[in-house]
Amino acid sequence: MKNIFKILLVMILSFSLCMVYASQEEIDNAKKATEEYCEEDKEKKGCIYDPNNTLYTESGKVKNSNFGAWISLSGAKLTRGYQAADSNGNMVFAGCYKVNVKNVDAWSDGDYYIFKIVKLSGDTCKTTDSDIVPSEGIKWSSWPLSGEYDGKNGIGSDMATYEGWTAKNGGGCPLMFGLTANTRWYTSTSNRYVFSDDASGFNLQVFSFFGNEEYKQAPGCTIMDKDGHEEAEKCFNDAASKIENYSCPSDISKLSEMATDLEKYQTECQNEFKKLYSKGLLESEAEEFSNLLKTKAKEKISSCQYSKCNIPADKVSKIVEAKSGTKCENGCSITIKEQSEAENAQCYCCGGSSGCTYMWTENPGSACGKANKTKDNCIGTTATDACLTCLEDAYKKAGLTSAQKKCMVDTDVQKLKAESQVTEDIDKQFEDQVQKDLEENQSVRDGIENYSFTSELPSQGFGEGGETCEEIVGQNIAKLIKLALNILRIAGAIIAIVNGMMKLIPAVVSKDPEALKKAGNSCAKIAVILLVIGVFPTILKVIGKIFGYDLSCIFG
């Protein structure tokens, strides 16, 4: 009897669900497609862009496929975008939008998180699923029902699971996105989508009622991250402010030591980037902010030179004006070759008629000619010489005093060396940090992909594992089912009473004994029906309790 009751419940719960499983080949293909996408150097647009090269939003109402809730996304900004490949090899774009909702019927004010799944099949992008997740604590009311959202469940949708993430007012979208490799699992979607703030959130302890099937999960990668960008930008802007407040050393050449602090800033700020970035996004984001550090460092180095040489602000403006339109307008750049420590080393200029590079060496090549330069000034190229001469002319035009001009000329090479060293160090730090982040992302992806579990017919049934009825069915669904059953009970009772009265009243009016007898029999049957309608939920609850099934939230 217990097994029969279990099977009946399973059939009721699974009636409208089609269980189709991906083959191992499909799983492997999806995994490969995801890896290729996330590791590609060049941008691959997928469904994040529409033909007008704007963020793909399909602006308008977003509505759950199996629930009447909707929110307009018109003009909403994409907060975080993810890309992955499903088990059929189609590219899938998952977009998360945070919308602040006010004065909406049935819902209290607050942040609502909208998730959209857009699938690229062939050349067509189509929204296949959507979900609305109200922030924790947001209340809903639809007479005669009301309740409060926990921030962990969508409104009536089966398109996604949220593990290790809670929607909060003022919070952010989940950091990571993945999807199960089986094609259907208790859902009408072609994949089961998972969002999490933690890689362990992908390890879902779920099972199938039918068959014995192994599942693997393939993660996506983040290809757009508004929140992460803003967090990193704030950190790098703070670092830029620290560079501006950097104390200038008396020896300009010591400014190259700034690179140590810049490395610390870059490491700290780049940690604001989220896990599972695609390679293209990670590199472009990191490069943008590394360039910010380089620009600020160069500005500080120039500021220190002006300060050392007592150049007032009005003279700095005149120097900039004098350099305008010349070859030194944007300053000078140099390449520093490794210098020999040999006692007989001298400065040579090696190259051809179009220009040469200065080298401090004891073994000059055949294309090298001796140059009259000290070791400290044996750097750069003949183009550097021309640029430095250009700077000297600009100092004259700017009206610097002899002492100011001499100081600027004497420290120009030291300044260029510091700029070159700092720029080189930042580039190296950038490359090392990006590589470290990519390796970390790969380890997270490997951990998710290698996680698998076997699903089989469970030994424990609906509610036997200690879960309450509401935990299994869900608070909103339980209330809707309960409301529907109450309406059916009331409607059934009204119909039965009206039907009995329609049979009894004509018999009473006619005073026909035979008609009264038939009407009495009909009323007795109707009374039995009413009794059954009244006690049927109680009978089901008792049966469920006997066999360990909690049905209180449905028939309570």
Image (tube, rainbow, N blue to C red):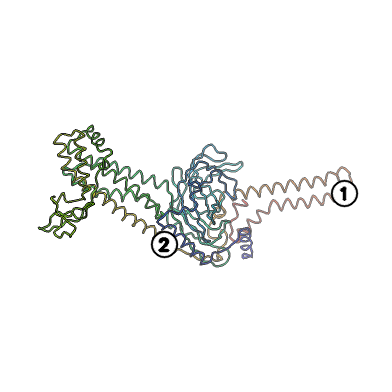
Task: Provide the residue designation for mark 1.
Answer: 515
Tell me the quarter of the image containing the N terminus.
bottom right
Q: Is residue 385 above or below residue 405?
A: below
Three-letter residue code for mark 2: Asp
User: Percent from the top left, x then y, of residue 482?
Assistant: 62, 49
Q: Name the residue at 17% across, 60% down.
A: 366
Callout in the foreground (1, 2): 2
Check residue 98 in the rendering and tell me which mark sits there, or answer none: none
In percent of width and height, residue 436 lies at 33, 57
Q: What x and y, as percent, mark residue 432?
A: 31, 56
Quadrant in the rendering for residue 545: bottom right
In the image, what residue type sits under mark 1? Answer: Ala
Apparent side of residue 403 relative to residue 231 in the rendered image (left or right): left
Q: Which residue occupies the foreground of this view, 30 or 172?
A: 30
Q: CA distance from mark 1 to mark 2?
A: 80 Å
Q: Is residue 547 above or below residue 395?
A: below
Label 2 sits on residue: 446
* Residue at the left extreme, as displayed: 343
Sequence-earlier tag: 1 or 2: 2
Q: Tag 2: Cα neighbours inside 10 Å, few (<14), some, or many (≥20)?
A: few
Provide residue 105's location: percent of width, then percent of height. Answer: 57, 39
The image quarter in which residue 538 lies:
bottom right
Please tell me which residue lies in front, 374 or 290. 374
Question: Quick one: 225 or 115, which is closer to the camera?
Answer: 225
Circle 2 sits in a helix, a strand or a loop, which is it? helix
What residue is drawn where x is 70% and y is 52%? 533
For the residue carrying disc 1, how many other residues have a C-alpha within 10 Å: few (<14), some (14-19), or many (20+)? some
At mark 1, the secondary structure is: helix
